[in-house]
Amino acid sequence: MTIEQKLNKEISMLFKTSPEKSRSGSVKSNLTYSEFLSDKMLMIKIIRAGVPYSLFDLIRSVTPFSEGDWSAILDLSLKSMQRYKKETRRFRPIHSEKIIEMAEVTDLGEKVFGDKEKFKLWLNSQSLALGNTKPIELLQQSYGKDLVVRELIHIEHGIFA
């Protein structure tokens, strides 16, 4: 089973127990990860309930972020993250929001660059448009994430600083 199939299955299972309506109002029986990332209301529901460790682990595997990056982004020690894994807990909403935001950033970054490795290289390279800061260093704060997303959209549209 591919990672995409695993993500689809995990997302589908999360919403099977309590069917959710998409923006169009229709109930989705087999929600995909891609559909989930395009529906802000569904993301809010998962954030409020807390991202289960199983979903975080799958998201982590498709992002270009190391364990240390995740620790910094979530402002959690590696030991705390191991505890979440061991106890198969759900993340608090504040952490869940960051996890979903990084899933969105990764999805956009991979669309813009066409591959995870090129996106990772960009994240770890200083950007003139971002004040000679590495984009990955901005992802800990929401405003920084917004700047990174804006720059990705500029790159996608051929607007370079």
Image (tube, rainbow, N blue to C red):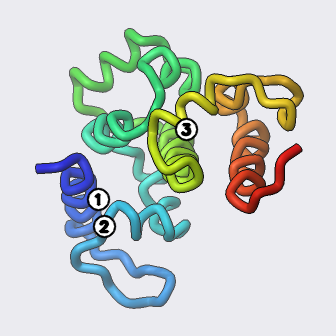
- In the image, is 13 to the left or to the right of 149? left
Neighbour tally class for label 1: few under 14, some 14-19, many 20 plus, Cα within 10 Å = many
Compare marks 1 and 3 and give the one earlier in the sequence: 1
Badge 2 element: loop
**Which mark lies nearer to you, 3 or 2?**
3
**Which mark lies nearer to you, 1 or 3?**
3
Badge 3 element: helix
At x 48% / y 53%, what residue is drawn?
48
At x 45% / y 44%, what residue is drawn?
115
Mark 1–mark 2 distance (CA, rounded to whole Å): 6 Å
Badge 1 element: helix
Q: Can the viewer see residue 100 in this picture?
A: no
Q: Is residue 38 above or below residue 80?
A: below
Q: Is residue 130 above or below residue 26?
A: above
Q: Can the viewer see residue 31 in this picture?
A: yes
The C terminus is located in which quarter? top right
Compare marks 3 and 2 and give the one earlier in the sequence: 2
Mark 3–mark 2 distance (CA, rounded to whole Å): 23 Å
Check whether the beta carbons of the residues at disc 1 and disc 2 lie within 8 A of each other. Answer: yes
- Amino acid type shown at disc 2: Thr
Q: Residue 32: which disc?
A: 2
- Amino acid type shown at disc 3: Phe
**Which mark lies nearer to you, 1 or 2?**
2
Which residue is the site of mark 3?
Answer: 119
Q: Pick whichever, 22 or 102, lies toward us.
A: 102
- In the image, is 110 to the left or to the right of 124? left
x then y, percent, for residue 65: 47, 27
Q: Pick whichever, 161 or 98, lies toward us.
A: 161
- Amino acid type shown at disc 1: Ile
Which residue is the site of mark 1?
Answer: 11
